[in-house]
Image (cartoon, helix red, strand yellow):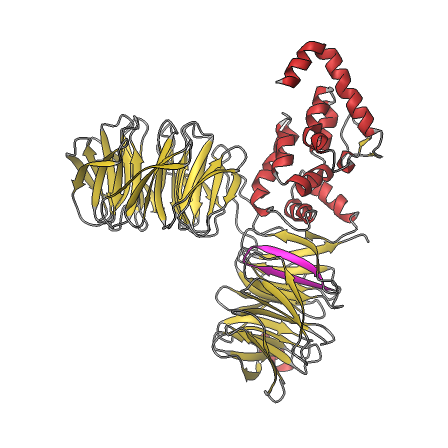
Amino acid sequence: MVRDFLHAEIGDVRAKRLHQMLLTEVASGLPDTSPVEWIEGLGELASWWEISEKMRYLWDHLIEHLLAAEENLCAEAVATDLRWVGARLAQSGLIAPMTDLAHLSTQRAARLRRVLSQTAHLLPPTEPTDLLTHAFYSRVIHDPDWGRQVRTLAAGSTTPTLISTWPLPDLPDPALVRTLAGHLGAARAVAVALDRTWLATSGDDGSTRIWDYATGVQRGLLEVERPTKVLTLAIAPDGSWLATGDEQGVVRIWDLKTLALRAVARANDWPVQAVAIAPDGTWFVTGGADGATRIWGAATCAPRTVLAGGSGRVLAVAIAPDGSWLASGSGDGTARIWEANGRLRLEVTGGRWPVQGIAVAANGQWIATAGEGNDTCIWETTTGKKLRRMGGSSSAVAAAPDDTWLAATSGDVVNIWDTATGKPRAKLGGHAGAVKGVAVSSDGTWLATVGSDGTARIWDTAIGTSHGKPTSHAGAILAVVLAPDGAWLATVDAQGAVHVRDAMTGALPRKTLKSGSVQALDVASVDSGLVTAGTDGEVYIFDILDRESARAERAGDRRTRIRKAIPGNPGWAEAVAISDDGTWLASAGADGTVRIWDPTTGKRRQQLFAHKGPVNAIAITADGSWLATAGNDGTVRIWDPTTGERRQQLLAHTGPVNAIAISADGARLASTGDDGSVWIWDTLGGRALTTTRMERPGRACAWSQAGTSLIVGGEAGLYRFAVECSG
């Protein structure tokens, strides 16, 4: 208000001059530089990312001042320069560069804002803060607009940066707007406010979260003292309250202005599976596992009517646009349409399996039903006639406001169906697990989904594009090791099979090894063989290049000879590593111990009580002077194998650490885990050097012999990172 008053007093011309004077004064103390990418009409510009951290006001308002000074080209150049973006990320987090870009209306600024939005959930607060920039660079290296900047800046960096040299197997679907991460456990329900500015999600952690659509920021958190799984939710048409239902049969009404409970009701102890609110907001309906559909008064949360019919749980409910009737879906495979007075109008059979989702057309002329094992079908609401049948089972469904398409969840994807033809329009994929719920915005321009991975995702329905055929790098990788001569790498897939691949391309397997369900592997030298450990508790050593195997390959036998089997840890052997000289190996298991063995005699040399809980990974230095372990307790620890003394502990992961690898010179250690992060550590000082993040948990990692690249395997697929540093 004060700024507007002063601007009105001094006039546009003088205000512009004052903005210019401020910028000129600050820029005089900064070195001039060239944009990372050439911009027509722009020469050198000040290195605004080098202004003092004490000048917080200017950091937050520089782009506004540049625009007010009519330096529009410079404003765009700064806001889209990744040096500025990186500095803002490190200082203030993702919201800072997003806010800067929101001041600009250019296509280039909008594109970068979209990229940042798609990457936001992979850029949580990080220590040291400057490593957040590293994580962002590694995610956009292959972007057609920003990859060139990343390569230029990474080449000139004095600290290591992980640069992906293979296409990332977890690139976002082009239709993805952003991912909202916050739930601890599966997210089960989602609803979008009528004004489209916010959405709500609920899940197994017992919370209901309110999210801002434009920024992805969590606005509010609704919780009770003793939380239980929240299975369903609905938002009132005026956006002033919402209703939730949980697995203990409790219905709650929440005031969204105060985030306080307005009313609580409980019909019985059976879970509340579904809820929908009438268009006038005066009543709502719930579906329960007891097989009843209940109508409630919204003001008092008092039950009005119980609708009984059929058998099995009521898993889905929906209300007509004019509030004159409602629909329910049951575990007996039927969908029923009820008059508002409780009279049954008609019922249809959706299939042999439960009807888990129902959507009502905006004109009220049809309903759509969905259920796992059943086709998605469209039914006329007056006669019960089946109008359309879409292929594939689904568990949740939502209709576009213009009735031209449906969104139906199926496994880990969402299918968009044309309601006129019954044919698919698009497939949206990205969730790391089953999609549990879907909701469409009131204008149909975007939809939101929630899934068992605990995330909510927002999708642009106008793009409606899905990825093509997955590359050979896609698919879960549980373990990986690189041959000492760099000629091949071995990976373990989700079925426990070992595949030998080309090390430079990661191409599909040249050879498949079989020894039960393998969980871990290692190799010391070409001659020492490939060591594996698996669910049978045994350690196996395979010959890769011996003459017998070569003859078997020529004969078409894709198996490789087992040289030796050694008793491992009690139960499953979770991790194994062998020293470079082949004179000792270490194995670990779920009991938290590490055992050191003589591979020749099979005798145990040493036992380390390494971690609280399972030990997931072991790595040994090239000279055998120390080994590192990683566990479910989220730590990486360095040990003396002779004395059993712990030398160091590395902390950064926010969940179990699944894999570690030590560079050939012993100077660096890489780690990855359930939080999807990859960390590079200085082993001498225990300092984190760089990091990146993947969409899904990391399971394995291995260094090249020169230490210039790192292979990482995860639930999304296989990655190869160049570790770039100019100094």
Magenta span main SS: strand
Please provide percent x and percent y for residue 453.
Answer: 46, 51
On whether residue 133 falls in the magenta region, the answer is no
Position of 29 with respect to 588 (left or right) is right
Residue nearest the observer in this picture, 477 or 240: 240
Q: Is residue 327 visible?
A: yes
Answer with left or right where residue 680 lies relative to residue 435: right
Residue 72: name its quadrant: top right
* Residue 582 image-quadrant placement: bottom right
Could you say where residue 241 lies in the image, as x and y percent from the top left?
A: 37, 32
The quarter of the image holding the C terminus is bottom right
Q: Which residue lies at the image location 56% right of the left edge and 50% below the top edge?
A: 170
Percent x, y of residue 573: 52, 75
At a point 84% along the width and 35% down the height, the residue shown is 31
Query: Residue 681 magenta-drawn?
Result: yes
Name above or below for residue 70 compared with residue 391.
Answer: above
Q: Which residues are magenta?
A: 668-682
Image x and y of residue 133, in percent: 68, 45
Pick the front one: 7 or 197 = 7
Residue extending farthest bottom: 601
> In this orientation, does residue 166 appear?
no
Q: Quadrant of the N terminus?
A: top right
Q: Nearer the viewer, residue 622 or 627?
A: 627
Q: Is residue 334 above or below residue 103?
A: below
Using the rendered view, name the quadrant where residue 583 is placed: bottom right
